[in-house]
Image (cartoon, coloured by chain):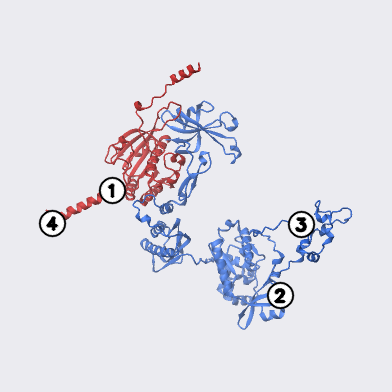
Chain colours: A blue, B red
Amino acid sequence: MTRSAAPPEAALQPRFVGTIDDDPGACSVPHGGGWRPGARWARDGAISGHSSQAELDALPAHQRPTMREMGRRNEHAEHPFKAMPSDEGGGTTSTPSLSWATLWRRPTVLVLRTGQRDVITAACPVAIDLGLRPAMAAAHARALVADLDVQDADLDADRALLDRLALHAVRHWTPTASVSGEDGLWLDLTGTTHLFGGEERFCRRLLAFLKRFGLTARIAIAATPGAAHALARFGSSDMVLLPAGQEAQALADLPLAALRLEPEALVSAARFGLERIADLYPMPRGPLARRLGLRTVERLDQARGLIAEPIIPVVPTDTPLVTRHLLEPIGTPESITQVISDLVDDLVVVLLQRGIGARTVLLTAVRVDGEPQRLVVGASRATRDARHLKRMLGLRLAQLELGLGIETMHMVVAHHEPLGAEAVGALLETSRKGRDLAPLVDQLSARAGEAAMFRLTSHESDVPERAIMRIAPLHAPTGWPGWKRPVRLLRRPEPLSNVVALMPDHPPRRFTWRWQAYRVVAGDGPERIHGEWWRTDREKWTVRDYFRVEAQGGERFWLFRRGDGVDPDTGDLSWHMHGLFG
Amino acid sequence: MLAPSPLLASPAIDTVARLREAVVQTRTLSIPSLSFGIGSMDDRLASGGLDGGGLHEIAAGSSSLTDDAAATLFLAGIAARFAAEVGQTVCWAMTDFDLYAPGLEQVGIGPAKLLYAQGRKDVDVLAIAEDALRDGSLACVIAEVKSADMTATRRLQLAASDGQTPMLLYRRYRTRDRCPLSSPSSAMTRWRISCMPSERLPWPGVGRARWQVELVRQRNGDPFSLELEACDAQGRLALPAPSRDRAAPPRRTDARDDAISRAA
């Protein structure tokens, strides 16, 4: 298959043809746009000179008019590394040289030998335009179209491609994805589409991705897999977004084949005169199951969301996974701890062989009744320390609901990072102080929660309450400038009353805070801090003058006054308590 | 017939000797106690300083926020000296976060040395502190709690000696009048800190802060009380200079007279 080399004629037709005024003699230049003083085409009669593409082509290369001369005023040079069209571009214009008609010059069909005859499994758009359809006999198609390109279908390659797409989906779009049938993918989009800007944008992105990949795709998003399956294959448009709860109405008009029924059930349904899915709704379920099979009723219920239909996700093959099947179900904490410890030991060997460390470990314990119980532990740094992993899993053990016992346990490393060999130096150290903190951080965050562990670092702001910022416990913080700062800061500055102070730049003599009067014996300051005008307009002119004062009993406070005492725009001269020095 | 035979006595003596050696070894393996560098204080402490593998309780002298800040700085200074070497970390566990990290940096415990852990309740904070102590990779563990009974302090003391990590337990006031140090505890030392007026400077500024440092109780020793100058940038306390050793303040009246005479 080759692309057509010659571009279509229309692309190079000069645009100015239609814009010429009706009376060219009245003015030397055409009216109605496209005019520019001094344009060469307007001076030397280039309009009538090369009117057709053939004439243009006949000219030697150096005499051909440039795009600019032919009336395209804003013709930029193409950037050599032009960015690809964005994924969001819903209306990406397909250039004429890359349409299906030019890509597939000859009508092409894929055939598969079933029994005694070749049956078409897929047809290219050109072939479909010519009336060829899948499930048609190849001999019939050959008779209809003379120069038909017939090629053998390669089901294994199709399946491999779908598998690769499913793996790509697992890595990029959603953790739960699997191949559906011979031509589809399930993606469980619950809670993931907001990462791509909503369901609609996600669909457009997906379509654009598949188009770049050379595939035509149809997408349906629905609350049940059955409805999504039906709408994607038999829906009205390429992109169907179905709100939850409307499955029954949306499916009503679709043919029965949309329900993934068995061929026998379809044949018997056709015999009974049932064509659309809506025909099944009013039928009593008992006779329906007897005539079309229990499977039909089940499919109908699955599509309408009355029966759950879980998607069994594909797991990337390179995910480290260890499994223990138990001879008898276990239920005591000691035995479970033992199995977990065995699993961790197995896992560490796998990790060591591949030179990776675990960041997230998922433990799945399958109960006797088939209900999986999951435990997830995360490490703040890649680790394959068996003792550490066992301790972290041990802390979460109480979350398992054992029920009647556990039959099988799997341990999967959901997220891993490369981890090289560790230095032996740590073994020779006598003191444990100053060791790597990652195990301790993991242990404490398993106990108190991820957000409970933090460090504080400086943030570029002079306003005291904004100068600190929380960061993750293993990140490197930076310090603050050496201005005198209190050790405890009030959550909000508290107003002082009965303040006696000499304006503008002396600390107060007396003040009352929290119903107690203080007499100031010494003070340092002011330290002037201006508002951050780039944040809000209110802070445009504001000023705080901070003072460090000592009261008569030895109490040391950090106070500030709003305003510089001269300009009323800078503040209302009220005094506030902000922090305490010991 | 119960008298020990000489044949049995000698192994028993050997065992005792071996046990003694082991005890001595563990004593030397444990990290040395941290002295304050102030003679009158270290002499009165039973181990010549703060035990590096023990629980120490600190409380403010009153429920006022200024005494609270003084006690916070006192324990931050101790933690800074425990974590004086590069790369050592202090874990600070609390329920309500109102510390101001720039102020802590100014007593020698910079942001790179400090790891905060915030628990929901006092029980969480005590559990975090115990885990951190037993891990043994920290230079010091600080926990702020409002209530800790005998069992909790006993657990902390055992964890501290197991992990060879000093534990500073800051007891905050639950009620206005009841000192948290009045409840029993198994801490090695118990301190109470309150603010004192600082020395007046010859200019109208605030001098180095001064605290009343009161050792309420210690194991194998007597309580005492001292007036000390607050932590400096490395977390070290100092004795106030006696008034006769102090540099003489310039006489204001004389200076003013000189200025007037010079102007005239």
Q: Residue at x 82, y 62 (%)?
A: A50
Task: Report the chain holding disc 2.
Answer: A
**In the image, are marks 3 and 4 on the same chain?**
no
Mark 3 lies on a secondary structure that is: loop
Residue B100, percent from left and from top: 46, 40
Residue that badge 4 annotates: B7
Q: Are marks 3 and 4 in contact (CB under 8 Å)?
A: no
Instruction: Give the residue number, with chain letter if any, for mark 1.
Output: B28
Please give the chain letter of the residue carrying mark 4.
Answer: B
Quote the CA–CA distance across marks 2 and 3: 45 Å
Q: Residue at x 60, y 32 (%)?
A: A569
Secondary structure state at the residue bearing disc 1 = helix
Report, in whole angstroms, how far the alpha carbon at label 1 lies from the one at label 2. 94 Å
Q: Quadrant of residue A91?
A: bottom right
Asked whether the viewer can see residue B114, the reply is no
Q: Decide which of tag 2 and tag 3 comes sooner along the chain.
A: 3
Q: Are marks 2 and 3 on the same chain?
A: yes
The one of A454 and A435 positioned closer to us in this rendering = A435
Residues packed near mark 1 inside 10 Å, few (<14), some (14 to 19) or many (20 plus): few
Q: Amino acid at mark 4?
A: Leu
Q: Which residue is mark 3?
A: A68
Image label count: 4
The amino acid at mark 3 is: Arg
Q: Which residue is mark 2?
A: A131
**Discs 1/2, front:** 1
Find out whether the residues at labels 1 and 2 contact each other: C-beta distance under 8 Å: no
Q: Position of residue A327 (x, y in %)?
A: 39, 70
- Mark 2 or 3: in front is 3
SS category of the residue bearing label 4: helix
Identified by mark 2, the residue type is Gly
